[in-house]
């Protein structure tokens, strides 16, 4: 497929030419008029305990906020999901400029950034590592960021970013409720997909919120000050850390709204 060549040539994703299966890769363009309303989709129930927040770290692709997932204190259930899924981490993807940056697109429109909240099926699988390899192992909530008003909740994260400027830097971050980053509008699209960075496993039920959250220019610029590179290396700004769009192939995107 063209995506294998595209991936293999793309600097950030020098992934193996063949991807296991390769029939449900992410991200994709969501063509609003081709999505199918599913009246049986339930509302997504989100309950996060802010004290499960552990630390922020720069993993050389993005910055991750990681959570204590040893118990069911921060979970999602409902929506398209058969089981309850535990929050493990959230991170973002963004562009060098506001014209692009999101991984998914809606009617071929890019947003300047996209938030991913990564959850795993701890009902069926004993560890995250195992869930990553299974078709129903992960559930990722995607939230688009658009340029607009200052986002109070995001600012606490932004204030911590200078401390994780370099790859492998980590700081303690012990109370944060990620629900403040999720729009109150319940509408979402959902489809079967994959991780968008290696290992690219086809284990993700994607839940993409229809409504974006608004952040201001300074907050987007703060993301762009991070570095892909470690302290002491020649600086490379962490920007454009989004994967190219992948073919929809034999998939339908369902919507929870008409
Ligand atoms: N952008 S995304 O689709 O939300 C996405 C992309 C890649 C990952 N990712 C990459 C490596 N891992 C990972 C971490 C720990 C582990 F034990 C196994 C993994 F696959 C992971 O979860 C997690 C989320
Ligand atoms: Zn992501």
Image (cartoon, rainbow, N blue to C red):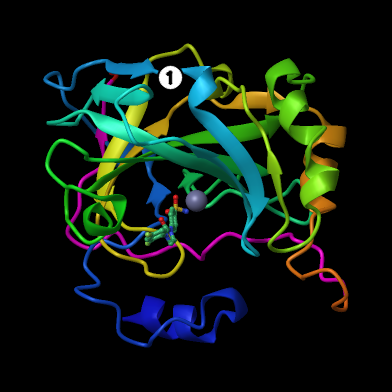
Q: Is residue 97 above or below residue 210?
A: below
Residue found 58% across the figure and 48% down from its top: 102
Residue 238 colored magenta? yes
Looking at the rendering, the stretch of residues picked out in magenta corresponds to 235-256
Answer with left or right where residue 66 lies relative to residue 41.
right
Residue linked to disc 1:
48
Residue found 82% across the figure and 32% down from its top: 159
Which quadrant of the view contains residue 68?
A: top left
Which quadrant of the view contains residue 134?
A: bottom left
Answer with left or right where residue 146 lies relative to residue 137.
right
Residue found 68% across the figure and 38% down from its top: 172
Check disc 1: other Cα within 10 Å, few if <14, some if 14-19, many if 20+. Answer: some
Describe the element under mark 1 as helix, strand or loop: loop
Say how many tags the image has: 1
Position of residue 7 measured from the top left corner of the image (x, y, whole percent): 46, 78
Residue closer to the observer: 216 or 199: 199
């Amino acid at each position: 497929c063209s995506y294998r060549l595209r991936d293999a040539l793309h600097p950030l994703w020098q992934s193996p030419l063949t991807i296991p299966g390769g029939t449900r890769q992410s991200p994709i363009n969501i063509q609003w008029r081709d999505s199918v309303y599913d009246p049986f989709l339930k509302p997504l129930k989100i309950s996060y305990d802010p004290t499960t927040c552990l630390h922020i770290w720069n993993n050389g692709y993005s910055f991750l906020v990681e959570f204590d997932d040893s118990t069911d204190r921060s979970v999602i259930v409902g929506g398209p999901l058969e089981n309850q899924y535990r929050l493990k981490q959230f991170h973002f993807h963004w562009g060098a400029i506001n014209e692009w940056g999101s991984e998914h697109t809606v009617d071929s429109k890019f947003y300047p950034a996209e938030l991913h909240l990564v959850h795993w099926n701890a009902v069926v699988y004993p560890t995250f590592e195992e869930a990553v390899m299974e078709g129903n192992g992960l559930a990722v909530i995607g939230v688009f960021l658009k340029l607009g008003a200052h986002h109070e909740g995001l600012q606490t994260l932004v204030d911590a970013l200078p401390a994780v400027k370099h790859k492998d830097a980590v700081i303690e971050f012990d109370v944060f409720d990620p629900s403040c980053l999720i729009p109150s509008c319940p509408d979402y699209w959902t489809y079967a997909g994959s991780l968008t960075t290696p290992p690219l496993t086809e284990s993700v039920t994607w839940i993409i919120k229809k409504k974006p959250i608004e952040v201001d220019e300074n907050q987007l610029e703060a993301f762009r000050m991070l570095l892909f590179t470690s302290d002491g290396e020649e600086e490379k700004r962490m920007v454009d850390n989004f994967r190219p769009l992948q073919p929809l192939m034999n998939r339908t995107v369902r919507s929870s709204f008409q």
